[in-house]
Image (spheres, rainbow, N blue to C red):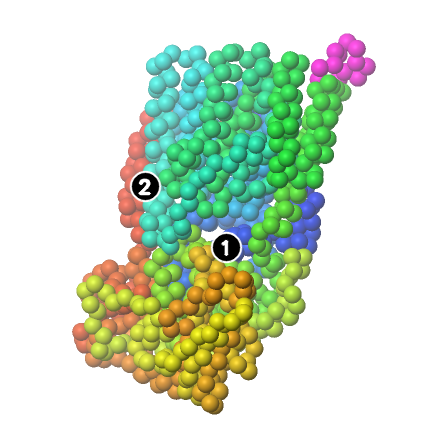
Amino acid sequence: MRGRGTARAVAGAALLSGVVFCLSGLLAGSRPFGQVTRNTVDLGQQYLSYHAYWRGLLLGDADGDLFLNWSSGYGSNFLGDFGTYLSSPFALLVVLFPADRIELALYVITAAKISATGAAMAALLLKLRGDGPRPVAAVLGAAYAVSGWTFNYGATVPMWLDGLLAFPLLCLVGEWARGGRRPVLGPLVVALAWIANFYTAYMATIGAAIVLAVRVLTSDEPGRERLAGLLRAARTVLVGVGLAAPVVTVVHAATRVADPTPEVAFAPVPWTEVLVRLLPATASVATPALYIGTPALLLALTLPFNRALAPRVRAVWACAICLVTLSLQWEPTHLLWHAGASPNGIPYRQTFVLCGLLLIAAWLSTAQGLPRAPALLGACGALALVVVLTRASAATDRWTYPALTAAVVLAATAAAAVLLDPRRAAACRALPVLAVALLVAAQAGEAAVTGARIEKQQLREVSWAPRIGPWHQAVAQETARRADWPRYRTEPGEVPGGNDVLLVGGQGAEYYSSLTADGYSRTLSSLGFGYYAKGRHPVGLDNPVTDAIFSVGARVHSTPTAPVRVDEPPTAAVTSTRSPVPPLVTVRPGLRLPERGARLGDSAFANQELLLGAAVYAMPRDLTRSDGAGAATLSASCPAGSQAYFWAPEYQGTAALEGQRPVEFHGKPPAVRAAMQSLGAVPASGALRIELRPRNPGKAAPRLPGQPIGCLDRKRLDAAVRKLTETGATAVHTTGHGLTAELPPGSTGTAVVAVPRISGWTCAAGRAEPVAARGHLGLLAVPLDGRATSVGCAFRPPGLRLGGAIGVASLAVLAAIARPRRRRADTGFS
């Protein structure tokens, strides 16, 4: 009966967690229950796109494999991105949904993770104290799964939800280690947690270690048994992390060469702003999301006052919670929680561990029955103090205090139903049921309102992407119609969102990842491409010279037919163009690779010419500038009929060639770099007059590079393309993570492959042994001796060999652990 009751509590926690999460979306009017987009910040810019590509890869409909993504970034390290965004087992659910329902797929994945988290926390609570009321365990398990951290962070960064789930699972592993049970299952759970998302699993492991330490300190076991349990736990974690090494080392190696974000100095927020996040309907990415529900918080606050618990238990758990709270605000421990690097954006990502500790405290204080009146009064007094201290905080919402009041009233009524003397109650058998119903209503109702309000606040305050709809579908259809990979690349152009190419197909420059290679980002920036996210989100460049360099033979163009809104999928007019370009592999007969490698310079126009191998721009040398009131004018001369391109990566405003329409530039250093754009054809007089109107005319005059204008001669470009095509590869073949190219006989000099030289490539000419790829101005390059008639390159993610070796060694250790216990295999969670 006890096992059946535990199963019901675990299932109840899962169901309640999922229902509350869905109810919050229903109240917010967001998809899939309403019309409003959920695609805020990186959920719309990154995670939807990666899951769409993952679905295609699993179903055999992607350009690439698990090692390499040919679609974005002109060829990027996919195993690193897989380990960062897609390695959770829940991500496999994408195959159950059609391609045009990827938003629904990601929502279901998110809801499934939240439900599993509630179940895992309920199982942990009942493991820590198995004689407590099962319904309360279910409610507290759900409170952890739908905490403020989940609504404010995890729901829009679904990979972090794997860490939320990992914390109770790793605490269970600690309990197994203490009892010498499940020596094989324990490391496997650790490995799964670290593979699913090792970033938050690292935080969850620290949190589980804290719980284990508290359990050991409050245990009555002999010292030798306590030490043995700690050693078994350490072994379990080491073996489990070792099993996860093939993914962890690849991500670590990719992180080392990723485009660096600006260093962030941690600054603790005022304590009132920490405390206010305990209240419902509060939202902020700059403060710790501590909300766990008012009923659960009140139960947690009873722990120091609850005389039914042993003094040592109360003291150790209270000290642990206080120390963890203090660790959020002290820079050395802040860095420890975040693996030595203060993160950009959300500084309190580890808060879910503190939420878990608070809920464990709530359970321990309730497992023997509802705390007595003095403890309840002490908890109410502490909550009242929090409300008084934080009443002036800007983090509160108009729903904060109404929701808080309603939850307190319901919780108090539930407590009264439990404390009522059964001898005086006419329906005493119904009172426990009523108490549970009131507790569920208080906890779940407040949490649903909190989730809805947080979602609405985020939509008002942060960037968002619209729902996937007709615009994306039209671009995907046109991209598929023009596609002829690897004969040439098809650039899908820009659709609303990020990593567009992963959604609509093609092989573009756009690439948004935490692991975007620094070398790739710098190469594109030097050629006039723009970026967002401080360099980690390069975007495409509509320029015929760079199209020739990267073999972009087809380009899709789209223009919205109506303003993009939060409550409607966007529509657009879609067209495409086809241009002759050299093959993916070209031969430069006169090019000899220097030992230290050539470098790109300060002019994007000159850099394009260097990579193309031909002079195609006229650089005006008579450029003059005059600044006026809120504007600036550039004057120069160029060959009549040439195409004028303007490059000002830090400029924010419009630039207009006289007689032409203004063109928008969106530079905002250091986060955003504006791309080079065409301003129109040079008039017959050859005189250029460009008017600049900054978006903020009151600020300093716009800063321009030394050569902001280049005039493209299409005849020269066409001649350069013909020459590269004549001497380039006669055929190019690609595999999942490699390519081969057949060359004209007698090819000498250097074969330049229009693929970024990121770490992991090896290349060879003819039948030579592959060696680490050399580079030419950021692209792959293979020296030729005149005898080879082919070149081949293959990609292996850096760190994979080391991770594989560690994984094999860990597997051998696990086999050695399992051998003497084969007959006693136990795979349960109790």
Closer to viewer: mark 1 or mark 2: 1
For this view, does 616 lie left or right of residue 507?
left
Q: Residue at x 53, y 34 (%)?
A: 270
Q: Secondary structure at mark 2?
A: helix
Q: Position of residue 40 (x, y in %)?
A: 57, 52
Residue 77 relative to residue 136: left or right: left
Relative image position of residue 272 (x, y in whole percent): 57, 32
Q: Residue at x 75, y 12 (%)?
A: 422
Q: Is residue 174 left or right of residue 129?
A: left
Q: How many marks?
A: 2
Q: Residue furthest bottom?
A: 684
Region rendered in magenta: 418-429
The amino acid sitting under disc 2 is: Gly
Mark 2 Cα shell of 10 Å, populated few (<14), some (14-19), many (≥20): many
In the picture, the disc for residue 807 is 2
Between 693 and 785, the residue placed more toward the observer is 693
Question: In the rendered view, would you say 656 is above or below 13?
Answer: below
| Residue 426 inside the magenta-drawn segment | yes
Task: Report whether 629 appears left or right of 752.
Answer: right
Residue 371 on image: x %, y %: 63, 16
Disc with the residue nearer the chain's start (1 vs 2): 1
**Does residue 715 appear in this view?**
yes
Question: Residue at the location (55% across, 22% down)?
Answer: 361
State the mark number for residue 46.
1
